Amino acid sequence: QPSAEARRVPDPERILSEVFGYSGFRGRQREIIDCVAGGADALVLMPTGGGKSLCYQIPALMREGCGVVISPLIALMQDQVAALRQSGVRAAALNSAEPIARIQEAERALLDGRLDLLYIAPERLMLPRTLELLARARVALFAIDEAHCVSQWGHDFRPEYIQLSLLAERFPGVPRLALTATADAPTRREIVTRLGLERARQFVSRFDRPNIRYRIAQSDAGGGSARDRLLRFIRQEHPGEAGIVYCLSRKRVEAIAQWLADQGLEALPYHAGLSAAERDRNQKRFLTGDGVIMVATIAFGMGIDKPNVRFVAHLNLPKSIEAYYQETGRAGRDGLPADAWMLYGLQDVITLRQMLDQSTADDGHKRVERQKLEAMLGLCELTSCRRQALLAYFGDDLESPCGNCDTCLEPPATWDATEPARKALSCVYRTGERFGVNYLIDVLRGRETDRLRALGHHHLSTFGIGTELEPAEWRVLFRQLIARGLLRVDVDGHGGLSLDESCRPLLRGEAAVELRREQRPARSRRERGSR
Ligand code: ADP
Ligand code: ZN
């Protein structure tokens, strides 16, 4: 093994090959390493599996002192420490799972300068004892993994992350690197302000998975039962190939797995209600067998690295765009063509909303989750390229439509919703850009509630001009205006909508809005609202 001193050379290429055994950097790894090794702060957005770990491990080896990694997942922390030690890196972890003797040894090594990387759980880092320890040691850098946990808008907010803002004050000269795989624009803004990363360079990697073809259809818009359509999809497009089918409930997982097996396919169930032994057995079979189909709840997939999964099918709506991206991202890791195929029903929306309402989370959290669900629906109802919208959600732009998603390949039938869209925007404007969708629909449809009267909004010119659409149709329209970035949602307040600059062409009559025909329930159109 090369000695630690030999490794403390300012040459990332050499560390990459001698310590980690890799021949070249991926994506923007090299740029990020140069930035942090040079002492600057950075914010790194990279999809799962993109190679975030090296972005702090290598600078930690290049710089004087020990790199401190803050990670909320103890199991992953232990895997990493074990792997690093195998490569001859002097790594240790401080968390509640470590025996006391190991912790004392790690602390001594840190103070003696005999440690390259120290992994710490966030709640432990913030103990006065730990902070004092670090103050006495030489810290090369702080890496804050899963940085989206600091955001209340993010999907797994952890209160102990909030305190990490202290690091900037306590250790002013030490570079800080925040890393995450899931950060939409609001989450990213929150990470920057809460962690004091205003001056950090931001590295947004390509999130695109060009070999995955995205397809999304509504199950209640005709075309046969969901399971028949799934079977047809598998038989026609992926006979004998490995895939994952995601369902919302354990019961449905069991039923679909059984049914596919009855049709002669090798399909196995996976959910948290099965015994650990059965889950293990099914997972092994999926990983080692040929063409096994795993029917699973979202409990399945964390850390699964099977390169030749040819399709991921969703029989229910995922609860957010992040979840959809993560789950579909398990297809086609080998770079060969793969399918992300989804059938959702309006019942899913109702079920997910109910699950949310019944959860014990606080109101602010529920509101955020509800908006994430709306954003997911917005992606489903889109009439333009799905990949562009998906990537835009993560702050990654794709210049032209992809040509490899259903809306690109078979443009959906649409109706012209330009007039109602202009009414909606005008209503947002006239009510002062602070109300949520339900209130705005009341104004548009002329529903005189007490609140509306108290605010005097029954005198507005937009009051009652939108009787041509039902409330459900207005909701689809608002969702689309949000999904397309024409309306913004106030995430800190109460979900009030405001106009985005980009809605001007539409207001001026220079742009149009098309909506999917199937989202428009068949019924005779009533008279248009009068102005
Ligand atoms: P993330 O934290 O972004 O999910 P990891 O850091 O765990 O990703 O890396 C994912 C996998 O890719 C790991 O097996 C890692 O060893 C490998 N990897 C990362 N960078 C490189 C590289 N430059 N060359 C080869 N393999 C790499
Ligand atoms: Zn497309």
Image (cartoon, rainbow, N blue to C red):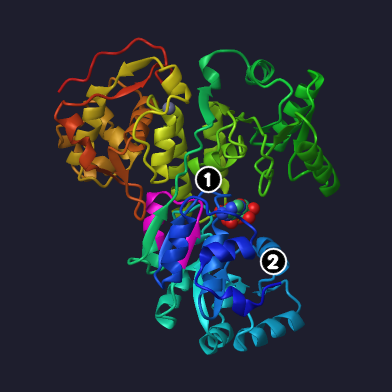
Residue behind mark 2: 87
Query: Which disc is residue 265 wearing?
Result: none
Residue ID at (40%, 34%): 388
Q: Which quadrant does the N terminus fall into?
A: bottom right
Above or below 34: residue 297: above
Asked whether residue 151 appears in the rendered view, the answer is no
Residues in magenta, as a range: 177-191
x, y (%) of residue 349?
52, 33
Q: How many marks?
A: 2
The amino acid type found where label 1 is placed reads Asp
x, y (%) of residue 32?
45, 61
Count residues near mark 1 (Cα–Cα under 10 Å), then give few for <14, some for 14-19, many for 20+: some
Above or below 14: residue 231: above
Residue ID at (72%, 37%): 250
x, y (%) of residue 204?
41, 51
Query: Which disc is residue 357 wearing?
Result: 1
Tell me if residue 466 is in the magenta stretch: no
Above or below 249: residue 33: below
